[in-house]
């Protein structure tokens, strides 16, 4: 491991930020997602990505905005490819000092290149469940499951991401 000392030093430096000692503040994150649909005329899954920014008001409440690639699906009646901008509220329950379970709910404005969803853009609801683990004081990982309504279809999105607290 040629870069193990540099990686260890970088992780140590990231863990020494003291701005989140009280579990409040700005965070940035991103990761990979798996998007699935039960629409029979489309292929059933695709990999994509998600980037988000949020603010934890306290351990129980956070406000978050995200940009999500909805993936690409091939279908009998046409293809689907889309993007989404989301605004959501996260209601969390801390489990110990570093683990947090949360539920999210909000809206997302989507834009899709597809005949199968009807309109090419609109605003719909999104909701989900997730778990976060603060690995260090300001660095964490998240696993979440969300449902996004896109016109006439529903997309199930499973995300694995990392975030940085400021």
Image (spheres, grey):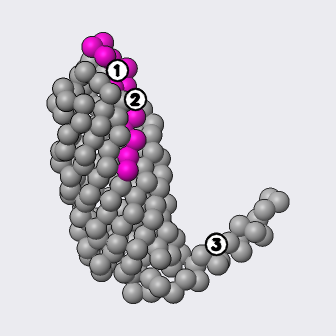
Q: Give the SS element for disc 3.
A: helix
Dots 2, 3 in contact, CB < 8 A = no
Dots 1, 2 in contact, CB < 8 A = yes
Vertical arrangement, residue 107 with respect to residue 116, above or below: below
Q: Which residue is mark 2?
A: 72
Q: Give the SS element for disc 2.
A: strand
In the rendered structure, the answer to whether residue 46 lies left or right of residue 77 reads right
Residue 44 showing in the rendered view = no
Nearer mark to the viewer, of 2 and 3: 2
Residue 61, percent across and down? 26, 73
Q: How many other residues sit within 10 Å of disc 1, few (<14), some (14-19) or many (≥20)?
A: some
The Cα–Cα distance between marks 1 and 2, rounded to whole angstroms, is: 7 Å
User: Mark 1 or 2 closer to N-term?
Assistant: 2
Residue 11: image tag: 3
Residue positioned 34% across, 72% down in the render: 55
In the rendered structure, the answer to whether residue 26 lies left or right of residue 149 reads right
The Cα–Cα distance between marks 2 and 3, rounded to whole angstroms, is: 35 Å
- For the N terminus, the image quarter is bottom right
User: Mark 2 or 3 closer to N-term?
Assistant: 3
Residue 69, percent across and down? 40, 41
Say whether residue 14 is magenta: no
Vertical arrangement, residue 8 with respect to residue 120, above or below: below
Q: Please report the bounds of the magenta region as a residue range.
A: 67-80
Residue positioned 39% across, 87% down in the render: 22
The Cα–Cα distance between marks 3 and 1, rounded to whole angstroms, is: 42 Å
Residue 33, percent across and down? 42, 44
In the rendered structure, the answer to whether residue 98 lies left or right of residue 90 reads right
Residue positioned 34% across, 20% down in the render: 79
Q: Which residue is mark 1?
A: 79
Nearer mark to the viewer, of 3 and 1: 1
């Amino acid at each position: 491991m040629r870069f193990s000392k540099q990686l260890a030093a970088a992780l140590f430096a990231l863990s020494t930020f003291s701005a989140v000692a009280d579990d409040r503040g700005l965070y940035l994150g991103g990761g990979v997602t798996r998007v699935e649909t039960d629409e029979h005329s489309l292929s059933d899954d695709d990999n994509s990505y998600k980037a988000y920014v949020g603010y934890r008001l306290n351990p129980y409440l956070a406000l978050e905005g995200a940009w999500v690639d909805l993936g690409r699906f091939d279908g009998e009646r046409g293809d689907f490819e889309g993007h989404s901008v989301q605004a959501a509220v996260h209601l969390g329950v801390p489990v110990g000092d570093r683990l947090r379970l949360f539920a999210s709910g909000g809206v997302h404005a989507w834009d899709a290149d597809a005949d199968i969803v009807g309109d090419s853009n609109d605003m719909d609801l999104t909701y989900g469940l997730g778990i976060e683990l603060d690995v260090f004081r300001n660095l964490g990982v998240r696993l979440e499951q969300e449902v996004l309504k896109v016109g006439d279809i529903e997309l199930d999105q499973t995300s694995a991401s990392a975030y940085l607290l400021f």
